[in-house]
Amino acid sequence: MKDRVAEYRRKMRERGFRPVQVWVPDVRSEEFAAEARRQSLLLAAADARSDDQDFVEAVATPWGDE
């Protein structure tokens, strides 16, 4: 298995690619769920008390009309 991975990586490098490691939040964790809920409640509250979206829609150009 180790040799197959090394060979695959060698071939990819020959083709001009390089490996990149990306760390992302664990969406299964309780901490993630709590933070997502907290942020969504803040967003919902902000949306209810502001006209920001109306402004964005007023100045936005629809796709294809630019």
Image (cartoon, grey):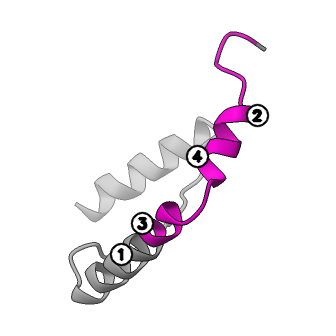
Pointer 2: what residue?
59
Pointer 4: what residue?
13
Residue located at (49% from left, 41% from top): 11
Q: Is residue 4 left or right of residue 58?
A: left
Pointer 1: what residue?
36
SS assignment at label 3: helix
Image location of residue 23, percent across then percent down:
46, 72
Image marks 3 and 4: residues in contact by CB distance under 8 Å: no
| Foreground tag (2 vs 4) | 2
Range shown magenta: 43-65
SS assignment at label 4: helix
Image marks 1 and 4: residues in contact by CB distance under 8 Å: no
| Foreground tag (3 vs 1) | 3
SS assignment at label 2: helix
Q: Is residue 32 left or right of residue 52?
A: left
SS assignment at label 1: helix
Residue located at (46% from left, 51% from top): 9
- Can residue 37 be seen here? The reply is yes
Residue located at (49% from left, 66% from top): 22
Image marks 2 and 4: residues in contact by CB distance under 8 Å: no
Q: CA distance from mark 3 to mark 4?
A: 46 Å
Say which mark, if any, is on residue 44. 3
| Foreground tag (1 vs 4) | 1
